Image (cartoon, rainbow, N blue to C red):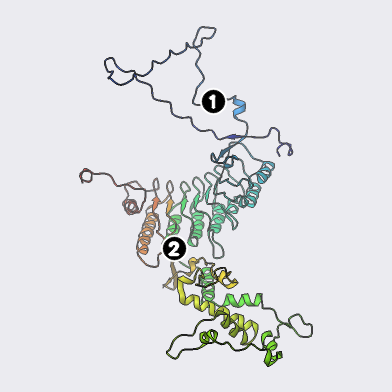
Amino acid sequence: MCRRSTIVPSPSVVMRPKPGPPPPPPETKPEKGSKEKGKQTAPIPEPEPEPEVNEDGEPVEPPPKTYTTKDKFEYFKPCVQVEIDPLDKGEAVTEIYIRGWKIDQTMMEIFQSCWPPLEKLHTINLWEAGLTGEMLHLMASFLPLCVNLKNLILDGNPVKEENFHELIGEDSIIQNLSLRFCCISEVGARNIGASLGTTKFANTKLLSLNLSGNCIGDEGACHIAKGLRLNRNLLSLTLSSNKIGNKGAAKIAEALSRFALCHEEVVERRRLMSERGSPDRKTLQREEAHPPPSRRADSKDRPGSVRSSGTHADTKKTREKPSARKKEPKGKEAKDQEITKGGKKEKEDPKGTQKKVASQGSSSQATFRLVSTLAASMVTDGAKTIGMKTKDKKKDKKPSATELEVDVLEVINPLMEEADFIDGELMIAGNRVLINLNLSRNEIGESGLQALLKAVQYQTTLTLDSRSSGTGLMRLCLTRNAVPADNDILKKITDHMIAKDPFYKSPVTPDSEQS
């Protein structure tokens, strides 16, 4: 494909270099008199060959064994480094590394044809590859076609348009995104925050986002905090070395603890609550979109919306002669349909219930009543009816369309959580899904640290409440900010987070060793 695109020389595909194995430990010669009976002595090593000597008589150093040497021009030639699955006989590529050479638009179009067919590709690393806004837009269009892609690393690629948010759009499947040292400013942070979560859309794939070494600042941190308000999927966020001050830290703390809903969020909350309050609305919309067939729906003389009061089955019964009607059941069939006088329940007949419903009113009303009865039975049965498993003799019976639609579970919107009315504003609990936050090497002062301390304390209190949906922050890094290391507020935050850090190991004391 490079030759067809007149790219000469084409970049070679090579295995990613790995460090060699550690050298073996030197063999120690046994001392004299240390031989024991019954044990064999080590074989005597062969004498080393004499070192080579050049014309001047000086010894020539042998080539190293831990790495290979290349010509300097060959070393700087562009190449595509790959990792291959060792267990796959077809040598499936799992990781791609491109570092230190500029990719043009033509090469990116070649990658568009080459990367999606790689079924086991899960990592793409483009370090200082000279990406542009057009290339990012092209990558956002074909990366969702890479089925198993999880990690995307674009460190050291400053883009003038700052359209990195296109990589985590609605169709994105990326779970870990790294954008270190990409010169992202407030404009790029605003777009990234909107991609994390808004009232209309929230990213449900991204788990880790690394934005360290950029120029986000306080305003950019406010935009990212706005995205965290309605995002319930991101687990790790790194904002180190971004010139974030007290204002940005306070907004992030507000998104993590408790915040007041704005006008747009209140309107969306009311809309969601109105839909939740009328569960039959979706059923009605489905009935209007796909109405049942009618005898006169295709007639030109009469519109299809006007239906007769009786169904096709009722008209057919009236035309039949009395002798042609079904005879009444006898024997066991009659006993099954009888009602006992001792207060026992009537035996269920699912087909009979459907016939009863069909005989009342029009076909649309019958279908609506059938759906409502199914929904009512599901509500009463609770969690047992989620799978729609019934003890029916016919095991091969396929589930109906209504049963399949009920199995779909709806994602709970953060705006639907319980709210408190305080000082004329609706307050809801913030993000408790984020567990790792790195704000080191910024410009956060005491007021920003105080806001973060209140946030982690509120999360700890909320975790004990039944309304909690998440563990809250488990790691919070605040080193090298605008406060000394022995600051009291910083010590309180550190002591509070140590108990929640899953990787923290308490120091071993002599008393614990004895016990």
Circle 2: residue type:
Gly
Q: Can you say which quadrant of the picture contains the N terminus?
A: top right
Q: Residue at x 54, y 43 (%)?
A: 155
Give x and y (percent) for residue 466.
Answer: 38, 67
Along the line of sight, which residue is nearer the eye, 230 or 299? Answer: 299
- Which residue appears at 65% of the width and 77% of the height? 288
The image quadrant of residue 75 is: top right
Figure quadrant of residue 461: bottom left
Q: Secondary structure at mark 2?
A: loop
Q: Which residue is mark 2?
A: 430
The local crowd at label 2, few if under 14, some if 14 to 19, many if 20 or more residues have their Cα within 10 Å, is many
* Precedes in sequence: disc 2 or disc 1: 1
**Percent from the top left, x then y, of residue 90?**
60, 40
- For image coordinates 68% across by 89% down, the residue present is 324
Measure how far apart labels 2 and 1 are at the Cα level.
54 Å
Along the viewing direction, whichever of 99 and 190 lies nearer the viewer: 99
Q: Amino acid at mark 1?
A: Thr
Quick check: marks 2 and 1 in contact, CB under 8 Å?
A: no
In this view of the protein, which residue sits in the foreground, 179 or 188?
179
Residue 68, label in figure: 1
Q: Secondary structure at mark 1?
A: loop
Quadrant in the rendering for residue 195:
bottom right
Q: Nearer the viewer, residue 389 or 308?
A: 389
> From where the camera sits, is residue 308 visible?
no
Residue 400, percent from left and from top: 59, 72
Residue in the image at 46% along x and 46% along y: 241
Residue 273 visible to an observer of this rendering: yes
Nearer the camera: disc 2 or disc 1: 1
